[in-house]
Amino acid sequence: MKRISISLLLAVALASTAMGQQADKGTPAKRERALRPTTERRGAEQGQIAQRLQKQIEDLRAAHQNLIADLRAIRATAMKEKATEAVGQIDKLINRQQQDFQEKVQQLELQQQQMQKAIKERAGNPEAAAQRGRRAPDFELNSFEGKTVKLSDYKDNVVVLEWINLDCPFVQYHYGKAATMIELAKKYKDKNVVWLAVNSTNQTTPEANRDFAKKHKLPYPILDDRAGRVGRLHGAITTPHMFIISRDGFVVYDGAIDNAPNGKTLDGGDKVNYVDKALSELTSGQPVGTPKTQSYGCSVKYPTP
């Protein structure tokens, strides 16, 4: 019992220390105070802040992985000593750390995206202007069910491309607490709108995607882009990232699914589903009023080139 008591104390100390250090560096209040004066500075300084946020995300991931590895090693020792009570407490520590980590990463990634948006707006957003009206690059991919899908096969339809990552909390919200994508796909199914999900996550597996599709009863396929070719070709940067392609093959919308990450608008205003609005306009013969927005979510986990 003495040995496992020491092990358990070590686990508590490790978890408390790591969580405390992350809280000091990453609490929303401190990050907000750090960012507030810089939002009025030049675009170059904003770029440096975006880079620092990326470094903070990478450091947080590394610290989290190390801590979880240590806790699991201690848990294995407790299992060998048959200290079931200690194992249960260590499991609670691991779960708490996993939740804390996810929340911090989401906050940092959202701030990073907001900073990148500010940089583009300060520069007059030339990239967005260049994207409007571009012809959608054709592609051929296999679904995780084994069916070959070609974009050119749907030339007489409006096509929605949704970039998906099964492990991303932002994606999980739209398939868990909300059924955003499924409901929209069903809403426009009879209006010659084709919905295709694309998974460019390099470490995803066919089994995981098939299980996900079965669990949520997806009315559309998930396409296998683990090589990342199609995602890079279209410029997908987050999950979710939405593209709408008109019947004549042009990208008429590029951006976020809505203005409410995890169901909450950033400014407290009304929620707007950009994709629903654009599809409503297209299927009514009207031009898309908002062709470009800043997508939000997790970064697409492309394979290393």
Image (tube, rainbow, N blue to C red):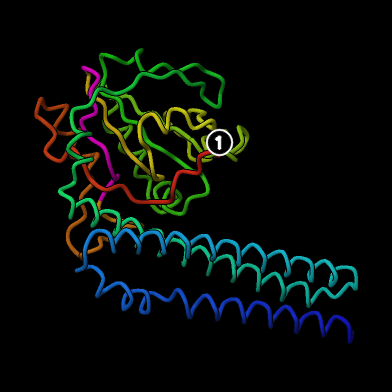
- What quarter of the picture does the N terminus occupy? bottom right
Numbered circles on residues, count: 1
Q: Give above or below for 267 relative to 133.
A: below
In the rendered image, the residue lying farthest to the bottom is: 2
Report the front residue among 80 and 105: 105
**Which residue is found at the position 36% from the left and 12% from the top?**
153
Callout 1 secondary element:
helix
Q: Which residues are magenta?
A: 248-258
Residue count near mark 1 (Cα–Cα under 10 Å), binned few <14, some 14–19, many ≥20: many
Q: Residue 275 or 236: which is nearer the viewer?
A: 236
- Residue 170: percent from the left, percent from the top? 41, 52
Residue 111 placement, left or right of 246: right
The amino acid marked with disc number 1 is Asn
Left-right relation of 93 to 111: right
Q: Position of residue 148 (x, y in %)?
A: 49, 16
Residue at image location 58% in from the left, 65% down from the top: 98
Q: Kindly identify which residue carries mark 1.
A: 209
**Residue in the image at 85% along x and 70% along y:** 77
In the image, residue 70 lies in the stretch drawn in magenta: no
Q: Residue at x 41, y 16 (%)?
A: 150
In reply to whether residue 254 is colored magenta, the answer given is yes
Residue at the farthest left position: 286
Residue 106 falls in which quadrant of the image? bottom left
